[in-house]
Image (tube, coloured by chain):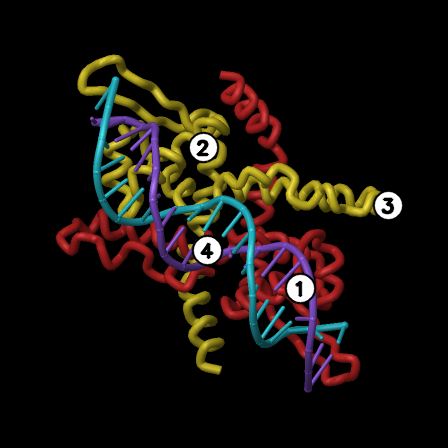
Chain colours: A yellow, B red, C purple, D cyan
DNA sequence: CAGTATCCCCATGGATACTG
DNA sequence: CAGTATCCATGGGGATACTG
């Protein structure tokens, strides 16, 4: 979530551009927004895991291999801020915090799965293309 | 395209993990691969632009506001390496190079549009959620 | 258990200059 | 026109230590 991602290029866009171009650039910015939200290192993985159901902090930490405590916290806070994930603190000791996809988050899950499907279907193609390219 | 993204966590994954976990981690890695390919700053924008048809280098440079010459080159090379974009050099002077989505690239376009649709549909929700969160 | 707080590395990517 | 080469600032994110 870069702080400067709200309008990365808009300020420099020529004001004389056509309405069509304006729509295009606007679209570009939307894509950028979504990618900044979802394209960071851990968000999609967390969303996919929460797509299976409610999870506690430590559960996520253990089911997502490689994520650090810090990055899990940062990622969850970002997703919570954007309304994709809800955070429920149970006032018990030891503390218990549940994370869950919101309705909005679940709508993204559909798209995440579409991306995932694409990945699983074409990873071999990409690997082959890379090998071919590197061979040259 | 980080050089170390091929297997970001695999080497540290406990070899005793179950087959289910193996499948899960594999899926995680696939997602990571796709995001590394498509989740960088310019790839999706370039793919979206090439989705409209063949484009020359300078055309891309001018229709994608904010992209530097260097990053456009880097992005196009990456997409070419992964077999998503084809690069055709015409041996004329001044040089002319055409970029185009491959068949594989066009299959990704579908998913890109799905992501774009989601963005356009829910950007207002996200903006509102952010405002609410920041107000607290 | 579920975080914060620090320190710090290094990859991403922008700016600029040069070239076949 | 379509790049390559170089330098350098920013910040994403890992490791570690500490806490209510």
Residue located at (66% from left, 68% from top): B99
Q: Label 3 near label 2: C-beta < 8 Å?
A: no
Q: Quick one: label 1, few (<14), some, or many (20+) residues within 10 Å?
A: few
Q: Quick one: label 4, few (<14), some, or many (20+) residues within 10 Å?
A: some
Q: CA distance from mark 2 to mark 1?
A: 32 Å
Residue A90 left/right relative to B45: left
Q: CA distance from mark 2 to mark 4?
A: 20 Å
The nearer-to-camera label among 4 and 3 is 3
The nearer-to-camera label among 2 and 4 is 2
Q: CA distance from mark 4 to mark 1?
A: 20 Å
Quick one: SS at disc 2? helix
- The mark found on residue B69 in the picture is 1
The nearer-to-camera label among 4 and 1 is 1
Relative to B122, residue B115 above or below = below
Q: Which residue is mark 3?
A: A16
Quick one: SS at disc 4? helix
Q: Position of residue B64 (x, y in %)?
A: 70, 54
Q: Which residue is mark 4?
A: B36
């Amino acid at each position: 979530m870069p702080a400067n991602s709200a309008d990365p290029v808009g300020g420099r866009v020529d004001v004389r551009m056509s309405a069509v171009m304006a729509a295009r650039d606007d679209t570009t910015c939307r894509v950028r927004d979504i990618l900044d939200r979802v394209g960071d290192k851990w968000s999609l993985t967390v969303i996919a895991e929460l797509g299976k159901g409610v999870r506690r902090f430590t559960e996520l930490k253990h089911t997502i291999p490689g994520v650090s405590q810090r990055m899990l916290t940062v990622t969850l806070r970002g997703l919570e801020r954007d309304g994709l994930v809800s955070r429920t603190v149970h006032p018990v000791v030891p503390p218990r915090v549940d994370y869950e996809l919101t309705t909005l988050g679940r709508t993204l899950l559909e798209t995440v799965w579409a991306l995932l499907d694409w990945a699983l279907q074409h990873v071999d193609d990409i690997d082959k293309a890379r090998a071919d390219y590197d061979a040259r």
